[in-house]
Amino acid sequence: MGLIGLGYWGPNHARVISELPETELVAVADISEQAIRLVHGRYPAVRTTHDAREVIEAPDIDAVIIAIGGGGLCAGLGVVYVVLGSIALRNFERLARDRATLSLT
């Protein structure tokens, strides 16, 4: 499983995913170098990147949680999407454009 977004709830998602007996946290992405270092320190076997596409397009990842902060009605609550396959890239690009919270470059 992959995880995009390591803000307020992201580290909790990483912990829960890594504790599930039949689930493996394979890779995480975030724009924050500090967040990447934190996850790498706790889960050294997990791949880390600043590029969300690397997580979404990784052939060894079956599902991705996109946990990014939301605006408007979602402000302060965060937004979590679990996506599979090609749906992930389309939804993530729309979310990034709409929320302007993560860079895809």
Image: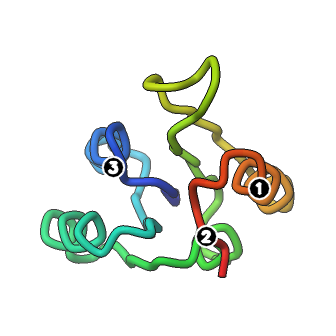
Residue carrying label 3: 14
Q: Is the C terminus in the top left, top right, bottom left or bottom right quadrant?
A: bottom right
Vertical placement of 82 versus 102: above or below?
above
Q: Earlier in the sequence, mark 2 or mark 3?
A: 3
Residue carrying label 2: 103
Q: Earlier in the sequence, mark 2 or mark 1?
A: 1
Q: Secondary structure at mark 1?
A: helix
Crowd around label 2: few <14 · some 14–19 · many ≥20 (10 Å): few
Whole-number angstrom distance, CA of label 2 to CA of label 1 = 9 Å
Residue at 67% over, 46% down: 99
Q: Nearer the viewer, residue 93 or 48?
A: 93
**Amino acid type, mark 1:** Arg
Toward the top, the furthest residue is 73
Residue carrying label 1: 97
Residue at 29% over, 39% down: 12
Whole-number angstrom distance, CA of label 1 to CA of label 3 = 24 Å
